[in-house]
Amino acid sequence: MTVTATPTRFARLARWLADEVHGGVLLLVAAVLAVVWSNSPWAQGYEDLSHWVLGWEPLHLDLSLAHWASDGLLAIFFFVVGVELKHEVVAGSLRHPKEAAVPVLAAVGGMVLPALLFLAIVLGTGSHDAVEGWAIPTATDIAFALAVLAVFGRGLPRALRVFLLTLAVVDDLLAIIVIAVVYTDHIDLVTLGCALAAIVVYGVLVRLRRTGWWVLVPVGVVAWGFMHASGVHATVAAVLCGFCVPALVVHGEDEPRTHRYDEAVRPLSTGVALPVFAFFAAGVSLSGSAGGSVFWAVLVGLVAGKVLGVLGVTALVTTLTPLRLPDAIGLRDLLPVGFLTGIGFTVSLLITELSFEGGEHLGAAKVGILAGSLLAGVLGAVLLRWDAHRARDADMNVDGVPDVDTGVID
């Protein structure tokens, strides 16, 4: 009895961890614990733990626990992002350019305007040394945003979740490109070539009829290690490995491997990688960190820049072009969605670490992320309930055809 019960309990735990709401709660608990500890009388203990170095120096892997969390564990999260992105591009919401155009353009608007607002505030106040943080308010935390939608969006069109997921995935893709291009100081072409070669090997292995995790994981780790040594952020290797996973059925299998790999790795991502990263990244002294140009630039970028960028671009596109929102979604539905995209958290904290690397603006930027993400999340939740209680038209997307896909989030 015990032998057969163990897998069942493990499967239940995995499903629990993979749930969007539970993952968001774990992330929030980890962040709150970090903030409380780092502002307590035992704050030095938190600092000592964060800076405890572990690893082998010859391979440039003598990293602090905080760096292991951001460079190592976060790679698990980005692998899931890569798998999700591959599925959406090949078989999901991004496979038809015309249908994906509006959320893709909305994602671009939701990144450009926050960046411009950030630059306007820091340059306008004379903080020229803070311009490197321009990308901090451009990110969207998929886990948190979908968790809030799942809890407070009940009764709203199911297509709204697809729209938010598409927007957030594109946002993550653009953030990954920014991390790879902007926040890479130097590149070792030899080790980068080795990393890409390992990724090609991974791509071949992952398409074979039978390849166990005990083969794929070591190859993925080798790709990660070479990418880290090359100077490009190591999480890029994880995204590329995730993108190698087949999104269509191969070898007569019952489902695409993107589904299987997502189901297998997501619990580890939401249950371990993201909470541990949040714990080490969110710990910042609140004393003297709130206020100042960087704090306000991040907060305004996340709260105002995101919603105005998403809504503004969507309104322009649907007014000036033949493109329309998906069935059953109206422009009013994008007001809460715009605020949800302002929950930057995970990727914003990572970009902050890359931008300031312990500099004087690090604390202010992190507090701005925490405050901005919290405010954006609360506003998004309130507006979701307001939207859900309003009467809906028969043609919400104003395309001249009565809405057909009217399923709701339950």
Image (cartoon, rainbow, N blue to C red):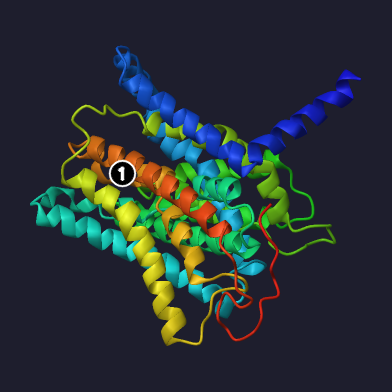
- Which x, y percent locates residue 367? 29, 37
Q: Quadrant of residue 98?
A: bottom right
In the image, residue 328 sits, relative to residue 227, either above or below, namely: below
Asked whether 170 or 201 is in front, the reply is 170
Q: Find disc 1 in the rendering and name its residue.
A: 352
Q: Residue at x 7, y 52 (%)?
A: 126
Q: Residue at x 60, y 44 (%)?
A: 20
Q: Residue at x 28, y 59 (%)?
A: 115
Please say whether residue 123 is visible from this viewpoint: yes
The quarter of the picture where the N terminus appears is top right
In the image, residue 379 sits, relative to residue 390, either above or below, namely: above
Asked whether 350 or 397 is in front, the reply is 397
Q: Residue furthest left?
A: 126
Q: Residue at x 43, y 24 (%)?
A: 33
Q: How many marks?
A: 1
Q: Residues within 10 Å of mark 1 (few under 14, many from 20)?
A: many
Asked whether 274 or 387 is in front, the reply is 387
- Which x, y percent locates residue 10? 75, 29
Tag 1, which secondary structure? Answer: helix
- Which x, y percent locates residue 221? 55, 41
Q: Is residue 349 left or right of residue 15?
A: left
Asked whether 210 or 363 is in front, the reply is 363
Q: Quadrant of residue 374?
A: top left
Q: Is residue 138 left or right of residue 327?
A: left
Query: What kind of residue is marked 1?
Result: Thr
